[in-house]
């Protein structure tokens, strides 16, 4: 089953998904195609140079077997490179779930629909950081 989200001038059969990781936010758009992945108007091989980040991004597509059947357009901002890769992974997984509800089981088994809730801990008053205290001086 394919559900479509109507957007003005962008493409009528695009399926949208949003992914977040730390402070990175990725807006993912999926449409039927031949497997092209574009991130911020660049090829994903140019955007993610580390193999670990590329594997992270491709995990939902490989788990569902949709690598060669859908085109993925991603707009990502905030955070660092690894956080952006994690945000893209979650956004692709959520968009694939909306693209075909039969893929949800494969995505759940791979833990690809779970948001990583780890965030930077805030600095507390009276301390130098989130947990580090001031240096002890005997004299």
Image (cartoon, rainbow, N blue to C red):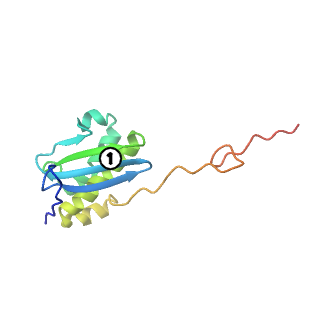
Q: Is residue 97 left or right of residue 90?
A: left
Left or right: 137, with 128 as reference point: right
* Residue at the image point whose x is 64% and y is 44% from the top: 129
Percent of width and height locating residue 109: 31, 63
Q: Could you tell me which quadrant the N terminus lies in?
A: bottom left
Q: Position of residue 18 (x, y in %)?
A: 31, 55
Along the line of sight, which residue is nearer the eye, 63 or 98?
A: 98
7 lies above or below 105? above
Quadrant showing the C terminus: top right
Tell me residue 45's x, y (percent). Answer: 25, 35
Is residue 13 rendered to the left or right of residue 25?
Answer: left
Crowding near the residue tagged with mark 1, few <14, some 14–19, many ≥20 C-alpha atoms within 10 Å: some
The spot of residue 92 in percent (x, y) is 26, 53
**Which residue reaches farthest front?**
8
Query: Residue sitting at 29 percent across and 35 percent down?
Result: 47
Q: In the picture, residue 6 is in which quadrant?
A: bottom left
Q: Residue at x 38, y 39 (%)?
A: 81
Figure quadrant of residue 52: top left
Q: Which residue is mark 1?
A: 56
Q: Residue at x 62, y 48 (%)?
A: 123
């Amino acid at each position: 089953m394919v559900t479509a989200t109507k957007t003005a001038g962008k493409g009528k059969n695009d399926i949208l998904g949003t992914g977040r990781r730390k402070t990175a936010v990725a807006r993912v758009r999926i449409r039927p195609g031949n497997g092209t992945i574009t991130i911020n108007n660049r090829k994903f091989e140019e955007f993610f140079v580390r193999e670990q980040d590329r594997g992270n991004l491709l995990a939902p597509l490989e788990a569902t077997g949709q690598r060669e059947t859908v085109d993925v357009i991603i707009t990502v901002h905030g955070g660092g490179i690894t956080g952006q890769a994690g945000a893209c992974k979650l956004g692709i997984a959520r968009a694939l779930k909306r693209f075909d509800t039969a893929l949800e089981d494969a995505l759940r088994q791979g833990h690809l629909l779970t948001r990583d809730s780890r965030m930077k801990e805030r600095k507390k008053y009276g301390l130098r950081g989130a947990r580090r205290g001031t240096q002890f001086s005997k004299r």
